[in-house]
Each structure stands twice: as structure tokens, then as C-alpha cells.
Image (cartoon, helix red, strand yellow):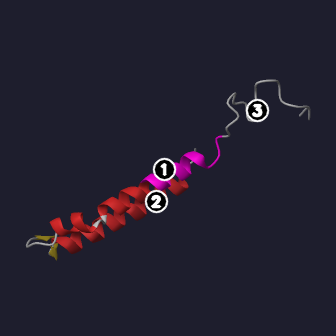
Amino acid sequence: MTGGPAPQGHKADGREDGRDAGPAPRRDRLIGLFLLALLLFNPPLLRLFGGDGALFGLPSLYAHTLLVWAAVIAAAALLAERRG
């Protein structure tokens, strides 16, 4: 390790634009997941599942809510554990 300054036009991490490859992409993906969850739990969409019908023996509203909830948790876990 030389300890000297980075060459002109390059940053310490080797990228020319000066942005680091830190948590920004992960944060952006988690924000996108949050917005998708807001859309999927939006009351007008939930009303579509409020009628008669069943899925796996559960009323369709409950089945939709539980399945979407589980999918959002699984996606958040995958995004949190993903490197890069």
C-alpha cells in the first residue's frame, strides 16, 4: 500500500465517477420493495379479494394478505443478504 493520493480522475475505490459501490443499490432495491408492498396492500386492490372465494381453504382476502406478506418478507431477506 503506497498511502499516496488516488490518481487524478479516479477515486480510491477505482470508479471514475466518484460514487462508491456501497449500500446505495441495496437501499434503492429496498425502497422499491417498500413501494411495491404499499401497492399490494392498497385498500382498492384488497377489495378485489374481499368477495367470495377461497384459496387453500382460506378466504381470498386472507390468502392474498398472508401470501403477499410472506413474499415481501422473503424478498427483504434476500435483498438484505445479497452482496452488491
Closer to us: 66 or 40: 40
Q: Where is mark 1, residue-wise?
A: 29
> Helix or strand or loop: what does disc 2 sit on?
helix
Does the stretch in magenta take in 27? yes
Give above or below for 66 relative to 4.
below
Task: Tell whether 48 sits left or right of 42.
Answer: left
The overriding secondary structure of the stretch rendered in magenta is helix
**Label 3 sits on what residue type?**
Lys
In this rendering, the label closer to the viewer, 2 or 1? 1
Q: Which mark is residue 76?
A: 2
**Label 1 sits on what residue type?**
Arg
Distance Cα–Cα, label 2 vs label 1: 9 Å
- x 44%, y 52%: residue: 32
- x 10%, y 72%: residue: 51
Q: Which residues are magenta?
A: 21-32
Does the stretch in magenta take in 52? no
Q: Earlier in the sequence, mark 3 or mark 2?
A: 3
